[in-house]
Amino acid sequence: MAGNIFGNLFRLTTFGESHGNALGGIIDGCPAGIKLNFEKIQYELNRRRPGQSSIVTQRNEPDQVNFLSGIMEDITTGTPIGFIVYNKDYKSKDYNHIKNIYRPSHSDFTYEKKYGIRDYRGGGRSSARETICRVVAGAIAKQLIKDIKIISYVSSVGNISVNKSYKDLNLSKKMIEHSPIRCPDPDISKKMISMIHEIKKKGDTIGGTITCVIKNVPVGFGEPVFQKLHAELARAMLSINAVKGFEYGSGFRGTKLTGSQHNDLFDTPNGITKTNLSGGIQGGISNGMDIYFKIAFKPVATIMRKQKTIDKYGNFVFMEGKGRHDPCVLPRAIPIVESMTALVLADYWMYKKLSKYSSIIEK
């Protein structure tokens, strides 16, 4: 199986399955001399972990990371950083009923047709539990690019939306984390939570959107033409389970404007613009303005309602989800979105550092 590596200079390789013994990863390219704050790493894992509220799966995992290499006395050594997170609370018997059945809108059918075998226990490698590895690496990446601020929040659930610009919201960590759904608008947050509870009672699931804002990115992140900053951010987001769409800046809304309406006119000699419909990226390169984008998440495919499907023998059958599942992935996806964003930015931070080093050598 290919496709388990993300990044170029700051690179993450992950391994493991949802109901296996453990998940883990190797981070290549992290510079030596970075003093790590392990409490911050665990904090990010706690934001992703199951069982943190009544609107997420009740699987009870401590999600404690163990580092195996690449760190000495809390400082990175420049060698590969190996880490592992053991699974503690998996109940594989909850999936016995789908051993020979393909769940609608899951990877069951495609995995078995591609590889000739699949791990039906929680989806195996296709499970969203794999994202725990991304959060570990992303937490380290955040400490590498510590001057850059990454903030994400839930901006819609179903047809309930935050109808304000991110600039008009209180995007403090305290405000966002205070809400179980991680929405900074208190009134909208209550409506979202109420909707999820109602959906859960019906044995159904719901999707929505997450908005991510990145501040203090210096001018020059991005490597055109095939590694444009927005292209790599899109690739990172679309690699997350359940993501169905990505837009940055004006996005699809910009298609309704004319060029004179859409152009970001310069306001100062140092490149600050009056508007930021470009979303902080022009020509695939960061321009120093805020970068902002939105990601669409589908409803979780596993529902506690009877559905018609097929089995591996080509028969039509009925099935119903069992076990512990998220009625809505959005609140737990927030740290995953931020982690993947941090991995992209850490990669470009390394490119910029390498470019400066090359210039010194040439001189």
Image (tube, grey):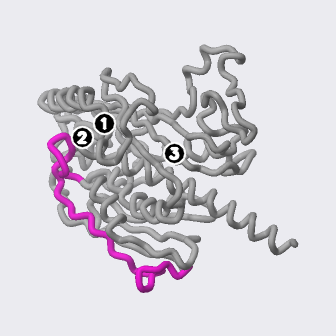
* Tag 1 residue: 183
CA separation in Å, label 2 and label 1? 6 Å
The single residue placed furthest to the bottom in the displayed view is 73
- The disc, 2 or 3, on the residue closer to the chain's N-terminal end is 2
Q: Check disc 3 and report its element: helix, strand or loop.
A: strand
Is residue 102 visible in this depiction of the protein?
no
**Which sits in the foreground, 279 or 68?**
279
Q: Amino acid at mark 1?
A: Cys
Would you say 117 lies left or right of 308 here?
right
Q: Position of residue 288 (x, y in %)?
A: 64, 44
Q: Check disc 2 and report the residue beneath it.
A: 179
| Residue 203 in the figure: left or right of residue 107 | left
**Three-letter code for the amino acid on which mark 2 is drawn:** Ser
Q: Residue at x 59, y 35 (%)?
A: 279
Q: Nearer the viewer, residue 166 or 354?
A: 166
Q: Which residues are magenta?
A: 50-78
Marks 2 and 1 in Cβ contact (< 8 Å): yes
Query: Split into 4 quadrants, where in the image is the C terminus?
Result: bottom right
> Is any part of residue 318 visible from this angle?
yes
Q: Disc number at residue 214?
A: 3
The stretch drawn in magenta includes residue 71: yes
